[in-house]
Image (cartoon, grey):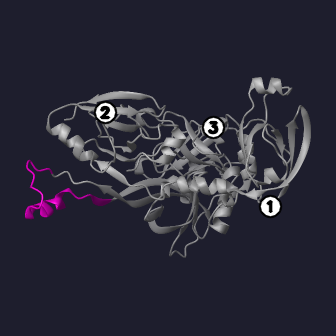
C-alpha cells in the first residue's frame, strides 16, 4: 500500500434533535455516522511500478559470448501493478466524487467502493497545486447519497468534528475530535490555509470529508504529522471547504482550474521593514518584483510597493495574498490599496489568469508527468530519482544525485530510522547516479555480510550517515 501523509475527518449530522446545539457533544455519534456513511467512499487505484530482478550470477560472460544476451533477460527491469488506497465523498447523486489529487495521481485504474459495491471511475479534473480531484463514477444509473458543503469560515477552534474514511484499507471507519487550530501553513501547497484537527486520522484517510455537527463538509482531509510513520498522533490537516468549493466547481465545469493572476513576486513585511516604511505594524505583502506585461505591470505597481488590501480584503500577511488572488474571478476589475513612499494609494487593474501566465507554464513544465519508481526489495522501500524540482524546492546542490524515498513498508529495516522524502545519496560512500540498479547494489552489500552504510539528506536538508545491519 502506498504511504501518504494524509487523513480524513467527518462530523455529526443534522439528524440529532433540535435542542442540541452545534457546539454540544451528543451522547452518541451513531445517528450522524449512519446518515453520512453511505456518502463516504473508499478509493483504490493501480499504477505500474518499475522494479529490477534480483537474480545474480557468480560469473560473467566475455563480450560477444552467445550466452551474454540470453542471461541479460534475468537482469532486465520488470514491471508490476501497485495499488494505493484513499477516501472520498459524493457531492452529486449521479456519482461525482471529491478526493485528494495525490490519491489518484498517475493512476491507470480507479475503483470507487460505495458500501459493498464497486464501480470504475474516471477523473473529471484534478489540481495538484491545491491537492483536490473530482471523479465521476462510470456506468451506473444509481442515485447516490450526497453530502453538502458547509461554511468553513464559521468553524471555530474547539468545535466537534467526526471523520469517516478508509484507514489502512480497513473500510468505513468513524472517529471524532475537535478543531484544534485554523489557518495552518505547513508548506504543503502554495495555498496552505489548513484546518487542524485531533480526530484520529491515518494513511488511507486521504481525500475524505471533515464534517461539522450539522453533517456539512467543512474540509477535505489531506495531511497528518506522523513521525517515523507512527500513524495518527492527533495532528491532522484539512483543506477548508470554502477554499475547495470554488476549485471543485471549476474542475467539474472546465476540467481544470482558472485562478486569478496578479503577476508579482512577494515577500514578508518584517518588523524592521515596517519600521522603515512607517507602517504601524508588519502587515501586507511586499512586492519584490513585477512580471513584464502582467496585470500588475500594466496597472503601474512597482517593486517596493506594499499591498495592504486586495479587492476589499485586508492582506494581513504575505501568505494571504496568493490565496485571495487565486480565489478571485479571472477578468474581474479589482482595486488594490498600496503603501508607497509612506503614503496609501489606490491602483485598479483587471485580473489575469494564472494558468495562462508564463510563470505558471514554467512551473508546470518542471513537474514530472509520471515519475518512474523502483521497489528496493532488500530494504522494503520504494524510491524515485531526485529531480530538478526537488533540488529547486529544497534548495539543494544542483549537481546532487540520489534516490527519494516515496514509501517505506512496515517490514522495512529502515522503519523509525528514515522517513518518506528523505534522500539516499550514497551507498558505502559511493554516490548514487540513478535508481535503476539500486536494489542490486544493496544486495551485493548484503551478500558480502557487510552492514549497509547510507548517506542521507533528511526532510530538514541535513546530511547524516546511517548504518543498517541487513538480515
Residue situated in front as seen by the camera: 335 or 67 = 67
- Residue 66 appears left or right of 336: left
Q: Earlier in the sequence, mark 3 or mark 2?
A: 3
Instruction: Answer yes or no: is residue 461 visible.
Output: yes
Label 1 Cα crowd, 10 Å radius (few <14 / some 14-19 / many 20+) = few
The residue to which callout 3 is attached is 185
Compared with residue 379, is residue 48 higher up or lower down, i.e. above or below?
A: below
Residue situated in front as seen by the camera: 4 or 259 = 259
**Is label 1 in contact with label 3 (beta carbons under 8 Å)?**
no
Return the mark for residue 256: none
Instruction: Answer yes or no: is residue 224 visible.
Output: no
Of the two numbered discs 1 and 3 in the rendering, the one whose residue sits closer to the viewer = 1
- Residue 322 appears left or right of 420: right
Q: Earlier in the sequence, mark 1 or mark 3?
A: 3
Q: What percent of the width, then of the height, locates residue 313?
A: 83, 44
Q: Regarding mark 1 in the picture, which secondary structure is present there?
A: loop
Q: Residue at x 53, y 42 (%)?
A: 392
Q: Regarding mark 3 in the picture, which secondary structure is present there?
A: loop
Q: What percent of the width, then of the height, locates residue 32?
A: 60, 50
**Is label 3 in contact with label 2 (beta carbons under 8 Å)?**
no
Q: Quadrant of the C terminus?
A: top left
Tell me, yes or no, whether the highlighted magenta stretch contains residue 234.
Answer: no
The residue to which callout 1 is attached is 331
The residue to which callout 2 is attached is 454
Q: Earlier in the sequence, mark 1 or mark 2?
A: 1
Q: What percent of the width, then of the height, locates residue 250?
A: 68, 63
- Residue 421 appears left or right of 142: left
Give the magenta-colored segment's residue range: 56-80
Q: Residue at x 19, y 37 (%)?
A: 445
Q: CA distance from mark 3 to mark 2?
A: 32 Å
Amino acid at each position: 500500500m502506498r504511504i501518504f501523509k494524509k487523513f480524513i475527518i467527518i462530523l455529526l449530522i443534522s439528524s440529532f434533535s433540535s435542542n442540541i446545539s452545534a457546539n454540544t457533544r451528543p451522547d452518541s455519534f451513531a445517528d450522524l455516522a449512519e446518515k453520512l456513511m453511505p456518502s463516504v467512499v473508499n478509493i483504490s487505484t493501480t499504477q505500474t511500478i518499475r522494479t529490477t530482478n534480483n537474480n545474480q550470477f557468480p560469473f560473467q560472460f566475455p563480450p560477444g559470448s552467445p550466452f551474454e544476451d540470453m542471461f541479460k533477460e534475468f537482469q532486465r527491469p520488470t514491471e508490476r501493478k501497485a495499488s494505493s488506497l484513499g477516501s472520498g465523498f459524493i457531492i452529486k447523486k449521479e456519482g461525482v466524487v471529491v478526493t485528494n489529487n495525490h490519491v489518484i495521481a498517475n493512476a491507470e485504474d480507479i475503483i470507487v467502493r460505495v458500501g459493498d459495491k464497486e464501480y470504475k471511475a474516471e477523473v473529471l479534473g484534478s489540481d495538484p497545486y491545491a491537492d483536490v480531484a473530482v471523479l465521476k463514477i462510470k456506468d451506473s444509473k444509481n442515485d447516490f447519497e450526497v453530502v453538502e458543503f458547509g461554511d468553513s469560515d464559521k468553524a471555530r477552534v474547539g468545535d466537534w468534528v467526526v471523520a469517516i474514511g478508509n484507514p489502512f484499507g480497513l473500510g468505513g471507519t468513524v472517529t471524532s475530535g475537535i478543531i484544534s487550530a485554523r489557518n495552518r501553513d505547513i508548506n504543503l501547497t502554495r495555498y496552505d490555509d489548513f484546518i487542524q484537527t485531533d480526530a484520529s486520522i491515518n494513511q488511507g484517510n486521504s481525500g475524505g470529508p471533515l464534517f461539522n455537527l450539522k453533517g456539512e463538509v467543512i474540509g477535505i482531509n489531506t495531511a497528518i504529522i506522523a513521525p517515523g510513520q507512527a500513524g495518527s498522533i492527533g495532528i491532522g490537516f484539512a483543506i477548508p471547504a470554502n477554499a475547495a468549493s470554488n476549485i471543485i466547481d471549476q474542475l467539474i465545469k472546465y476540467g481544470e482550474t482558472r485562478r486569478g493572476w496578479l503577476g508579482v513576486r512577494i515577500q514578508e513585511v518584517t518588523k524592521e521593514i515596517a519600521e522603515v516604511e512607517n507602517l504601524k505594524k508588519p502587515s501586507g505583502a511586499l512586492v519584490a518584483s513585477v512580471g513584464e506585461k502582467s496585470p500588475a505591470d500594466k496597472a503601474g505597481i512597482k517593486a517596493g510597493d506594499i499591498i495592504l488590501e486586495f479587492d476589499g480584503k485586508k492582506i494581513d500577511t504575505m501568505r494571504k495574498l496568493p490565496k485571495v488572488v487565486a480565489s478571485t474571478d479571472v477578468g474581474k476589475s479589482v482595486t488594490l490599496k498600496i503603501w508607497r513612499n509612506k503614503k496609501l494609494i489606490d491602483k485598479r487593474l483587471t485580473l489575469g489568469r494564472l494558468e495562462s501566465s508564463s510563470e505558471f507554464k514554467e512551473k508546470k513544465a518542471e513537474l514530472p508527468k509520471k515519475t518512474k519508481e523502483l521497489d528496493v526489495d532488500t530494504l522494503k522501500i520504494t524510491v524515485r530519482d531526485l529531480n530538478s524540482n526537488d533540488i529547486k524546492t529544497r534548495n539543494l546542490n544542483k549537481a546532487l544525485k540520489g534516490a527519494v524515498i516515496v514509501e517505506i513498508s512496515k517490514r522495512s529495516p529502515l522503519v523509525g530510522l528514515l522517513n518518506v522524502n528523505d534522500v539516499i545519496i550514497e551507498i558505502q560512500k559511493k554516490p548514487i547516479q540513478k535508481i535503476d540498479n539500486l536494489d542490486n547494489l544493496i544486495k551485493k552489500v548484503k551478500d558480502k555480510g557487510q552492514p549497509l552504510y547510507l548517506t542521507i539528506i533528511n526532510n530538514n536538508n541535513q546530511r547524516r550517515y546511517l548504518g543498517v545491519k541487513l538480515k
